[in-house]
């Protein structure tokens, strides 16, 4: 069980040490997430020479596995009863697994080829995503355990979101460095990827351990593990109308957000005609996503979580929608719109988990059990599913319009790319905003964590 050396955060104040060390491992995890999203497929097909269909099948199967692993980890972490608390044992266990599995992905043995190499990559990718689940679900749940309802949660999840985006910016720098390596041959790229994997694996493992060790100083909610079975726990999640609506909105919004990682490289090369500027476009998105987090947290504390998140959804939708008009040579327009979309994204990663934490307290008051793990497992699954749906839709559309890689594209292909990059997220954020108007859980309806356990 977590120690009581420091009192829980109050409505007025969140200890700086809690904010810093809770957000710290998200720097490394955010780094790995974006690096995997942007570079893995290219590395596997262009450097390791694995067939695209095989690598696509591996990634698709890993998403199916997430549908199993996320709920299991969420359920078990809720029912973990140890001197270290409910979540920290999982974080300690995840730390070495994350570093080792990331190394397996980007530093496979040189002698492996063909089927052996594909099998190695399949095991490595599954191990990586499983390790990430073991970390992310309990870590998100710990944020709710450590803070009462209201503004403190905005700050805690804001610190995590800010750190995640800082890690993403570092991933862009690492990817840009590796993209220069092919001039020296694929061997240089492979050696560079292995070096990146070793350094980042050690760094992330250290950050997770350091954070978990330091957070022992802060009191966390520790309830009886209870006797409720897994299916019953997730049934309660879905029966919570406030949580159900939030999860649907998070799913729809992330379908729109996913387009940045899916199509930026395509739009940069085939629509704007500047493939070399793809990292700069993503950076234009990421920097505002970092610097605006404190502003959004302050606004949410003053005006409330719902109106502020609703505003950010509208801003994101309009910003992405404007990208439909991106065309050859319109670099300043794309950078401006990416910056506005990034500024909007600075809010969602903080306020969404904060609102979901409030629904956990509402559920605990009704059922007598705290199920942060189950709720955040449902949220992470929705996010992963949203990215998977966007990847699948993009592939189907590009095949339907006869996209041919490494060639000048027809007007119909360019129209499809612009529509996916602009109109698709505009639709997603618009639907999400309309649904969010129906969200009815007010902060004065949420019981504090201590009361909910009693």
Image (cartoon, rainbow, N blue to C red):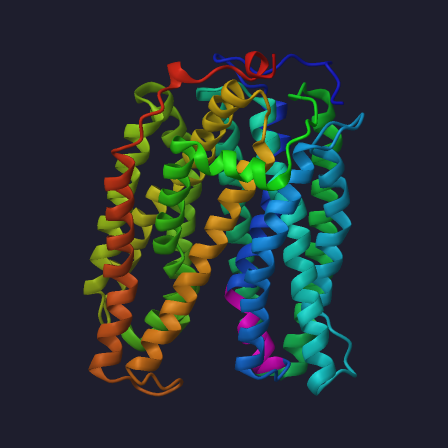
Magenta stretch?
Answer: 38-47
Q: Per the image, is 45 magenta?
A: yes
The residue positioned 56% from the left and 43% from the top of the image is 377
Q: Which quadrant of the view contains residue 76?
A: top right
Left or right: 423 in relation to 51: left
Q: Which quadrant of the view contains residue 439?
A: top left
Establish if 39 lies above or below 146: below
Q: Where is residue 441 shown, x and y percent of the image?
A: 36, 24
Left or right: 131 in relation to 164: right
Residue 23 makes an appearance in the image:
no
The residue positioned 78% from the left and 76% from the top of the image is 109
Q: Where is residue 227 shown, x and y percent of the image?
A: 68, 29
Q: Which quadrant of the view contains residue 54?
A: bottom right
Q: Where is residue 368 shown, x and y percent of the image?
A: 58, 20
43 or 92, which lies in front? 92
Left or right: 182 in relation to 337: right
Q: Per the image, is 137 magenta?
A: no
Q: Main secondary structure of the magenta part?
A: helix
188 or 268, which lies in front? 268
Q: Where is residue 116 shown, x and y percent of the image?
A: 74, 82
């Amino acid at each position: 069980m977590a120690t009581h050396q420091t009192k829980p955060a109050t409505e007025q104040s969140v200890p700086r040490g809690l904010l810093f060390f809770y957000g710290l491992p998200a720097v490394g995890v955010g780094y790995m997430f974006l690096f995997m999203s942007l570079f893995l497929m290219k590395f596997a097909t262009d450097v390791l020479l694995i067939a695209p269909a095989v690598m696509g099948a591996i990634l698709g199967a890993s998403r199916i596995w997430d549908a199993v692993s996320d709920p299991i980890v969420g359920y078990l972490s809720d029912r973990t009863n140890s001197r270290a608390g409910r979540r920290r044992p999982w974080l300690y266990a995840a730390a070495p697994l994350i570093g080792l599995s990331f190394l397996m992905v980007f530093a496979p043995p040189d002698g492996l080829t063909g089927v052996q190499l594909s099998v190695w990559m399949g095991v490595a990718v599954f191990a990586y995503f499983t390790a990430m689940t073991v970390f992310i679900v309990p870590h998100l749940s710990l944020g709710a355990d450590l803070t009462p309802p209201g503004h403190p949660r905005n700050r805690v999840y804001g610190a995590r979101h800010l750190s995640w985006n800082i890690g993403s910016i570092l991933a862009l720098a690492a990817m840009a460095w590796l993209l220069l390596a092919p001039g020296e041959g694929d061997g240089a790229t492979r050696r560079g990827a292995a070096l990146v994997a070793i350094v980042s694996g050690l760094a992330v493992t250290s950050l997770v351990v350091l954070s978990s060790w330091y957070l022992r100083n802060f009191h966390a909610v520790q309830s009886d593990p209870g006797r409720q079975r897994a299916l019953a726990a997730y049934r309660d999640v879905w029966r919570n109308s406030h949580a159900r609506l939030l999860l649907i909105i998070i799913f729809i919004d992330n379908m729109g957000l996913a387009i940045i990682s899916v199509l930026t490289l395509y739009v940069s090369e085939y629509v704007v005609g500047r493939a070399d500027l793809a990292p700069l476009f993503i950076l234009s998105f990421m920097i505002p996503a970092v610097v605006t987090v404190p502003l959004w947290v302050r606004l949410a504390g003053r005006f409330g979580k719902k109106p502020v998140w609703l505003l950010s959804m509208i801003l994101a939708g309009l910003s992405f929608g404007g990208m439909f008009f991106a065309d050859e040579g319109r670099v300043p327009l794309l950078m401006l719109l990416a910056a506005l979309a990034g500024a909007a994204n600075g809010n969602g990663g903080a306020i969404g988990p904060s609102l979901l934490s409030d629904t956990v307290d509402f559920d605990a008051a009704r059922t007598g059990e705290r199920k942060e793990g189950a709720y955040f497992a449902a949220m992470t699954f929705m996010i992963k599913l949203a990215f998977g749906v966007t990847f699948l839709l993009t592939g189907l559309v590009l095949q339907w319009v006869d996209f041919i890689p490494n060639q000048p594209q027809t007007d119909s292909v360019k129209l499809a790319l612009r529509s996916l990059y602009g109109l698709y997220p505009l639709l997603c954020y618009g639907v999400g905003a309309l649904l969010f108007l129906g969200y009815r859980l007010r902060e004065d309806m949420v019981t504090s964590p201590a009361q909910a356990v009693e």
